[in-house]
Image: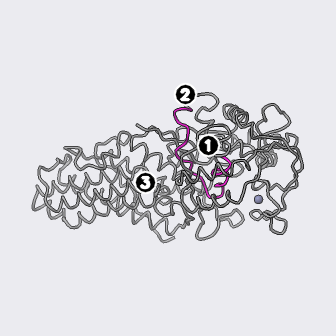
Amino acid sequence: MGKFYLTTAIDYVNASPHIGHALEKVQADVLARFRRLKGDDVFFLTGTDEHGTKIYRAASQAGLTPQEFCDRKSAEFKRLVKELNISNNYFVRTTEKRHEQACQKLWIACSQHIYKARYRGYYCVGCEAYLLERDLEDGLCPIHKTRPEIIEEENYFFRLSAFREKLLKYYDENPGFIYPRERFNEVYSFVEEGLEDVSISRSRAKLPWGIEVPGDPDQVMYVWFDALTNYISAVGYADDPEKFRKYWPANVHVIGKDISRFHCILWPAMLMSAGLPLPEKVFIHGFLTVEGEKMSKSKGNVVDPFEIISEFGADALRYYLIAEVPTTEDGDFSRRRFLERYNADLANDYGNAFYRMLKLALKNGLIVVNRPEVLEADDRALLEEIEKKVASFERAFEGLELREGVREAMDVVKLINKYIDYAAPWRLAREDKEAFSRLLYLVFDALRRASVLLYPVIPDAAGKMLESMGIEATSISLNEAKSYGVKSQIELKEIAPLFPRVSTDD
Ligand SMILES: [Zn+2]
């Protein structure tokens, strides 16, 4: 059994969760559940990022202490994780004591590359980042269209410039470190152009809400030095050496494209400086638009994931985010498209394949379906087709091609429906009981295999379908999806339709 450690980015608690947060969590959850199906010992981490200027100001605007503000906001993200049915093993908060200890330990471990210097430059609070003169457009932050603050103070710097060659060598030797390739190329050429040292602290007088720099109570850590450390603090870097040895380095960091430089340049350089092993892969997804437009508060088009979940269930949203949104490119959330995919794939194909056969079986008094002694040529052809799909599913998920993988799984469902239509079970039920029983076994066994493949994406529905065939969802493995007929008998139990069709005229 291998270990598999994966993380999402931690969410900055200055605003409430939106559908973009849901995308990243669901992608990571699908990977975590897939690795568990493969038998890996998975540690799956998500959490919240709670320090920095933006939060300090948002808290005082809300009339709360920073800690009270963070507690409230962090709870909203925890609720999102729960309602989305995310299977994380831990929820890290950067205001935890153990996280603070880990940041200080890492700072000391990096101290040979840390120096103090006077800094004068532009700082955008919206970005929580220093900007260079050349980054500005008409003197404004190009993202926030606001005038950056001019900051002049003594700060600690991290000698990032010393890591150019080492990073390039690492990228060359590990072409899979950044996925997809397009992002790899962006980071590579950025580093090739040369790196500048980065400020990693602020004066406490200006920013009281942060982790203290070891040995210098007048300085607090810059939020990114603090935030990135969550990936090691949560697996015991400062307080649980055994756990740390077991899970670090991470196998996959799942992040959005806006923070790729922090994860692909600064973070590996910090780890190199501290003499720690580097993560295996940074998986970078795109952004979501809503009905073709950029999501923004002022446009009033921010999609609330809680509303979709309460209307259609977590599975429906999870399915859309994996099956419709391109895995590593920008995608769109559209209500019309959401309802189309829901009705076509989940209600008609998956839910209905199961439910119409279940009703027919029960109507004919067949609660227990036995594995047939012999298969016909047509049956064997179906099994061969399924085998191919299962293999492509596994290849796709191994390669982080989530959308491709779920399509292969749904293809199994389509094959089953085609076979049902072809075999005409309604006629067989009247005219050929033996053929009818054989068909039932084939269909339910194939649905069992499809449900194992779909389990990482729609765990609730796939789990219920498996349970209605007498299979505990908690004990399934991918190997079972690879074989026909693992059970000599399938015992059926009636359940409510899994994805009731919804009306599309609104
Ligand atoms: Zn900005």
Mark 3 highlights which residue? 397
Query: Could you say whether the residue bearing mark 2 is in a helix, strand or loop?
Result: helix
The residue positioned 45% from the left and 37% from the top of the image is 41
Residue 388 image offset from top left, x and y in percent = 30, 58
Pointer 1 residue Cβ closer than 8 Å to ligand 1: no
Which region of the structure is painted magenta? 244-267
The residue tagged 2 is 242
Picture coordinates of residue 309 (x, y %)? 52, 54
> Compared with residue 82, is residue 444 higher up or lower down, i.e. above or below?
below
Q: Quadrant of ligand 1?
A: bottom right
Separation of marks 1 and 3 at Cα, in angstroms: 24 Å
Q: Amino acid at mark 2?
A: Glu
Of residues 125 and 250, the one drawn nearer to the viewer in this rendering? 250
Determine whether label 2 and label 3 are within 8 Å by CB. no
Q: Is residue 367 left or right of residue 212?
A: left
* Three-letter amino acid code of the residue under disc 3: Phe
Mark 2 vs mark 3, CA separation in Å: 30 Å
Is most of the magenta stretch helix, strand or loop? helix
Q: Residues within 10 Å of mark 3 (few under 14, many from 20)?
A: some
SS type, badge 3: helix
Q: Which residue is mark 1?
A: 47
Q: In which quadrant of the rendered view does residue 115 lie?
A: top right
